[in-house]
Image: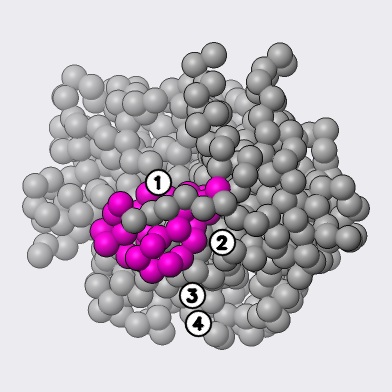
Amino acid sequence: MRDVYILGVGTTKFGELWDLSLRELASEAGLKAIMDAGIYAEDVDALYGANTSGGQFVDQEQIAALIADYSGISDLNIPSIRVEAGSASGGAALMQAYLAVKSGQLNTVVVGGVEKMTDVPSEVATEIIGGSLDAEWETFFGATECSIAAMIARRHEFEGKAKRENYAMFPVISHKHASMNDTSHFKNIIKIEDVINASPVAEPLTVFDNAPISDGASALVISADLKKINNASHPIRIKSSSAANDFLSLHDRRSVDSFRAVKKSSDSALSLAGLDIGKIDALEIHDSYSIAALIQLEEILGKDAVKMTEGNDFYFNSSKPLNVSGGLKAHGNPLGTSGLYQAVEATVQLRGKAGQRQVKDPKNFLIHNMGGLGTTSVSTVIGVD
Amino acid sequence: MSEVPRFWRESRHRYRLVGTRCTNCDTLYFPPRVICPTCRRESVGKMKEEEMSGAGEIYSFTVVHDGLEQFKMQIPYVMALVKMKDGPFVTAQIVDCSPEEVKIGTKVTATLRKVRSEGKEGIIQYGYKFTICP
Ligand SMILES: [Zn+2]
């Protein structure tokens, strides 16, 4: 089958962007991606739009149609479909777009993600984020997504698999990397004590264990059209993309403190790419909660993951750079956008254009985007030939 | 008012902790399911309703300080994963105790309580919460 390349990427700044609407964010990212790819709207066969909860945040559904419309391409009747898979919407949209292009039916596709979260008060946002849980049997009884993450953390510690410090250090790494990224929600550097001693949200997790509520949009142009690939200034290849799912609710899982779907999707993506984990130079993972970062790494890297948190392995200039973008924790977490921003970061890094936070000469990135806490898992391998 | 059926539909299961047993593999599920995730098509028509005893122990828990609007008056409150004596895990609040009394392994029992109310003059919804066994 034919190879699929990322021709262009674009992103807005992430954060509390009071003066920008959902449609303005989406069209900004889409336009940047199209210009970066060196193509025109006439070249686009389809648009895949990723969005998690627009209906609740801004009363807007049919978001892909809106994105297409306000990106000025409606007169071309380009098919525009929204993909929703909770906070894995971005990764899932990228995977669908990749498969569509890989299949041969479509040649060049725009994948755009957008979430406008700050038009509602933060308690309402917490409630909407909880929409990825089981509304009847978790949220109804008072569970928030953070409370579920907290119960995973508590049990993991109880089982003796990790200590508080082993996962409290992920926000520290993400903040360090975000401080070197212009589009980050947060640019401040924090210490591990700041994470542990911050005000509690759901014990043992504090505000610093949680990714923020952010606005933001990101987009990519992907293509298998050889002419366009040759014309693009710096095409980067999508080597594979694979997904897996688990039970929706933690209380139904075979294990409370592991993410079985993450192991399945990452193993599958690596195998489809013909690579083993040793050949992955850097990872972008879904650090919506610090504990979620640790459990994902245990699934992707194996038993060494906990030990690696005790050294400096995960910094951008070290052996296994992790979330060099700043991650969801510090670059920001506009739900449906996050998986696509991971792909934007991987592309920028593989082009060698990440400035201060540039990973040294990377060949392959594994990006992992997750819906809820281990419910939906999408792994994508992006690399240079 | 169109929301009303959504609330009473599950009330029987919530009031009495009624789950479903797959009579093909003899596993009890809660919340109730129409298909057993182990036996899948072999379980069709073989899921029988069964009430749990209400006894269980805390498998994991958290003290919630920043929660849903509906539960604001209760903050801080304890959410737990309770491993029921009958097998299933249940996500629920632990009440009538201070958070310090809650530990992994603590024995608890289900009790029917008001869980939330919808809107200012809305419908009061009941369901299970757990209390620590004396
Ligand atoms: Zn069965």
Do callouts 2 and 1 mark residues in contact (Cβ within 8 Å)? no
On the same chain, marks 4 and 1? The answer is: yes
Q: Residue B88, labelled with which disc? A: 2
Residue at (42, 72) in percent of width and height: A263
- Range of residues picked out in magenta: B18-45
Residue at (70, 31) in percent of width and height: B116
Residue A254 rendering spot, x and y as whole percentages: 49, 69
Is residue A65 visible in this depiction of the protein?
Answer: yes
Residue nearest the observer in this picture, A9 or A120: A120
Asked which quadrant contains residue A46, the reply is top left
- Choose mark 2 or mark 3, whichever is in front: 2
Near mark 3 (Cα within 10 A), the count class, few <14, some 14-19 or many ≥20, is: many
Q: Which residue is mark 4?
A: A302
| Mark 4 Cβ inside 8 Å of ligand 1 | no
Asked which quadrant contains residue A322, the reply is bottom right
Q: Is residue A336 left or right of residue A71?
A: right
Q: Residue A182, labelled with which disc? A: none
Disc 3 or 1, which lies upstream in sequence? 1
Q: CA distance from mark 3 to mark 4?
A: 5 Å
Residue B123 rendering spot, x and y as whole percentages: 66, 20
Q: Which residue is mark 3?
A: A299
Q: Residue A85, labelled with which disc? A: 1
Q: Secondary structure at mark 4?
A: loop
Q: Is residue A71 above or below residue A151?
A: above
- Choose mark 2 or mark 1, whichever is in front: 2
Near mark 4 (Cα within 10 A), the count class, few <14, some 14-19 or many ≥20, is: few
Q: CA distance from mark 4 to mark 1?
A: 26 Å
Q: Is residue A39 left or right of residue A210?
A: left
Q: Is residue A74 above or below residue B101?
A: above
On the same chain, marks 2 and 3? The answer is: no
On the same chain, marks 3 and 1? The answer is: yes
Residue at (71, 74) in percent of width and height: A157
